[in-house]
Amino acid sequence: MGEPPVTGRPLNVGIVGAGRISGAYLDTLAGLTALRLTAVTDLDRGRAEAVAERYAGGTAVAGTVADLVARDDVDAVLNLTVPAAHAEVALAALRAGKHVYGEKPLAANRAEAGAVLAAAGETGLRVGCAPDTVLGTGTQTARRAVDDGLVGRPVAATAFMTTAGHEAWHPDPEFYYRPGGGPLLDMGPYYLSALVHLLGPVTGVSGAVSRPRAERTVGSGPRAGQTFPVEVDTHVTGVLEHAGGALSTLLMSFDVKAARLPRIEVHGTEASLSVPDPNHFDGAVELNRGDGWEPLPVSAGYPDAGRGTGLADLSEALAAGRPHRASAELAAHVLDIMLTLMDAAAQGRSLTVSSSCTRPDPVIL
């Protein structure tokens, strides 16, 4: 992934949120010389201390968010809190002079996202946001195929994420079904970020939504069998109009027991492209010119990447003086696409997406 920023030392990282997803990030950080864990905090102090001990040999320090962002040995805050807290933590970090990289979505609403972007602009600090899976060899190889003209002029794309619901495996699934959650805000960022990488920003949307069940049941862990209310729509469909003219069909659902739908496909005037699951970094990319599917060799993307690659890319971007790829601008545009789609569904009409973003630079091998 390259060497640390212009300071000549690793970027010191403080983590806010030591929950389930933190393990994936910490496993990646452990193998990156450009990043060094220095502090951890969580609402559960014991969990923060356990993470600090396991992944930093006792050198990381547990504490509150205020304590963490005030530390001199924290250059960047890795924000792994629940979606409702993303903007609050990001703003606290920026006001304390720290760069930020956070889990998706960037914020719970447009106002919060705008506040984060404004604070980043005022302070000159970097803000990055997941997903960084789209920087892996899967999506990036597919993007190179599109950029190289292998599909011809892109005409359409499809993006499908279907599951029966996260309560089947998550021991505390309620936040997936509260405002800020749901299949679109939870999983949509992976698919929409991939579509923006592949086809560019979105200018308009239309959609429809449903909420078939008023309650869900915890399926695993010590609370298995407990029910909780569903506060968001759990089946979302939409059509996206890209600036380049292509149309994407989107389906995000927590209400599908089983499906054989592809994850993402791009269809052009010359060929069709099969794109792997954007929730993963790699996977097979296949091209069909009308005479069968053929695998494409890996031609772009960070190899052997893991969650946290976007933060490492941000670190390298600081050193090189270039834009980082998993940017807040892209994340804000993706959030705006999702919220506009929900607005379009509620109003029963097509709506213009008011934001845009620059298509991130490709990751060239």
Image (tube, grey):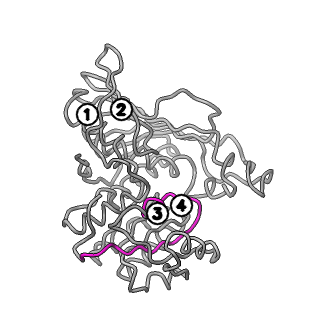
Q: Secondary structure at mark 2?
A: loop
Point out the residue furthest to the right here: 225
Who comes first in sequence, dot 3 or dot 1? 3
Q: Quadrant of residue 176?
A: bottom right
The Cα atoms of the two marked residues, 1 and 2, are separated by: 9 Å
Amino acid residing under circle 4: Gly
The residue beneath circle 3 is 107
Marking on residue 145:
1
Q: Quadrant of residue 45?
A: bottom right
Q: Quick check: marks 4 and 2 in contact, CB under 8 Å?
A: no
Q: Secondary structure at mark 1?
A: helix
Magenta stretch encompasses residue 336: no
The Cα atoms of the two marked residues, 3 and 1, are separated by: 32 Å
Identify whether 267 is placed above or below 15.
above
User: Which label lies toward us, 3 or 1?
Assistant: 1
Identify whether 33 is placed above or below 272.
below
Residue 244: x %, y % from top left: 24, 38
The Cα atoms of the two marked residues, 2 and 3, are separated by: 31 Å
The residue at the point 38 percent across, 86 percent down is: 72
Identify whether 359 is placed above or below 3.
above
- The magenta region covers 8-29
Amino acid residing under circle 1: Ala
The Cα atoms of the two marked residues, 4 and 2, are separated by: 28 Å
The residue beneath circle 4 is 23
Residue 251 is at least partly visible in this image: yes
Who comes first in sequence, dot 2 or dot 3? 3
The number of callouts visible is 4
Residue 211: x %, y % from top left: 64, 43
Q: Quick check: marks 1 and 2 in contact, CB under 8 Å?
A: yes
Who comes first in sequence, dot 4 or dot 2? 4
Q: Is residue 185 left or right of residue 257?
A: left
